[in-house]
Image: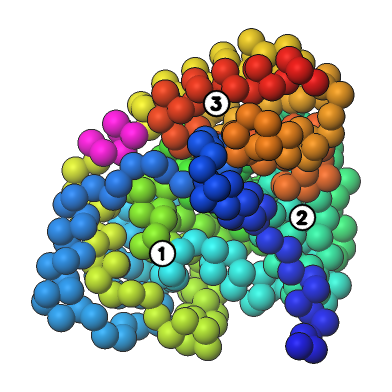
Amino acid sequence: MNFAERMSLLGTESAFEVLAKAKNLEAQGRNIIHLEIGQPDFTTPMNVCEAAFKAMKDGHTGYGPAAGLLEFREVVAEHISETRGVDIHPDEVAVTPGAKPIMFFTILALIDEGDEVIYPEPGFPIYESVIDFIGGKAIPLRLREEVNFRFHIEDLVDAISSRTKLLIINSPQNPTGGILEKDDLDTIAELAVKHDFYVLTDEVYSRILYEGTHDSVINRPGMKERTILIEGHSKTYAMTGWRLGYGIAPTAMADKIAQLMINSNSCTCSFTQIAGIEALKGPQDFVDQMVAEFKGRRNAIVDGLNAIDGISCLKPLGSFYVFPNVTQLPLSCQALADYLLDEADVALLPGTAFGKFGDGYLRLSYANSIENIREALARMDAAISKI
């Protein structure tokens, strides 16, 4: 077919490509350990499932408002007000099928051709993909291992120009597990106000934090009116397939997101949103137990990676990923990832799947059992010793 030229500008998520390749190998009888996909290996809490089933039985199976059910937006507004320390109104909440549309719609609504968008790299690959697709100019902001995968403030200052329209930040971060500190957020807010740009803050891993409490740029002076906050239920409540995300934004932006929803998805599933109310309002024991389990896995995988000759790995502060440095090994990170899948039956991602500044690293998700993680480490150690 003769596709539109813009389609060539869209990137992809390598995790799904590696997952497909790993599944093909499994179909051939191989025993693959999956450390490539960013999906909690826990089942959705039963109280949430039961709430969805009851909603279906009660008839909540038709169209709903494009912006989301008012009752869900009210609960979300209350939740964000409590957790971010800023007063949020339900009209400032826009609900979408998963969190990705908030990212896509924000860039689509704000960015004209030639406008510059600063984004973190290594980072979630869809940021750059959508910026390019819309016709914006993607400006990478390097995250550096020597500062726990944060960025140097001077790098951000240097990246800002008169064409800067939007800064994207992600904390806790995918793929590195890094977290922005209070001073980072303070400086971002000062620069945003000074240079008059917006901030898209991706906080979908906000509850998967191993020390301290989550902080957000939205509560800084002058920032509520220039911040779009991305959140959702996928990671926190193991609801990836439910597709339930939301954005917190000034009312004018929330209205634009609803307009784009009308033109694309119509609305987000109503019974999913009712289940989402139960997730936020019901017992939180599940989240606490899941994060505690992730913390144990984090410790095991970091210790195991650091015990392999040629690999060094920082301990992530949030999310469920590690981003080990493999520059001391004789293979490129892409060749090493391919080798470990082919020779060790361990599926993981090269750092370059997250941008050029990911070169020399691997990304491993520890959303897998501790037994599988230990087996994967043993296989990796054995395979790397043969290089």
Identify which residue, 310 or 125, lies in the foreground.
310
Picture quadrant where residue 244 is located: bottom left
Q: Residues within 10 Å of mark 1 (few under 14, many from 20)?
A: some
Please name the predominant secondary structure of the magenta segment in the image. helix
Quarter holding the C terminus is: top right
Q: Is 292 positioned to the left or the right of 218 in the image?
A: left
Determine if the magenta segment contains residue 287: yes
Camera-side mark, 2 or 3: 3
Location of residue 29 in the rendering, given as x and y in whole percent from the top left corner: 51, 43
**Residue at (46%, 37%) from the top-left corner?**
367
**What amino acid type should be assigned to the residue bearing mark 1?**
Arg
Residue denoted by label 2 = 118
Q: Which residues are magenta?
A: 285-290
Q: Is 378 positioned to the left or the right of 149 in the image?
A: left
Identify the image's colour scheme: rainbow, by chain, secondary structure or one colour: rainbow
Q: Is residue 38 visible?
A: no
Location of residue 242 in the rendering, given as x and y in whole percent from the top left corner: 36, 62
Identify which residue, 199 or 257, lies in the foreground.
257
Identify which residue, 52 or 283, lies in the foreground.
52
Q: Is residue 238 visible?
A: yes
Location of residue 356 in the rendering, given as x and y in whole percent from the top left corner: 83, 45
CA–CA distance between discs 3 and 1?
Answer: 30 Å
* Badge 2 or badge 3: first in the primary sequence: 2
| Res. 376 mark | 3
326 over 98 or under it: above or below? above
| Res. 243 mark | 1
CA–CA distance between discs 1 and 2?
Answer: 27 Å
* Badge 1 or badge 2: first in the primary sequence: 2
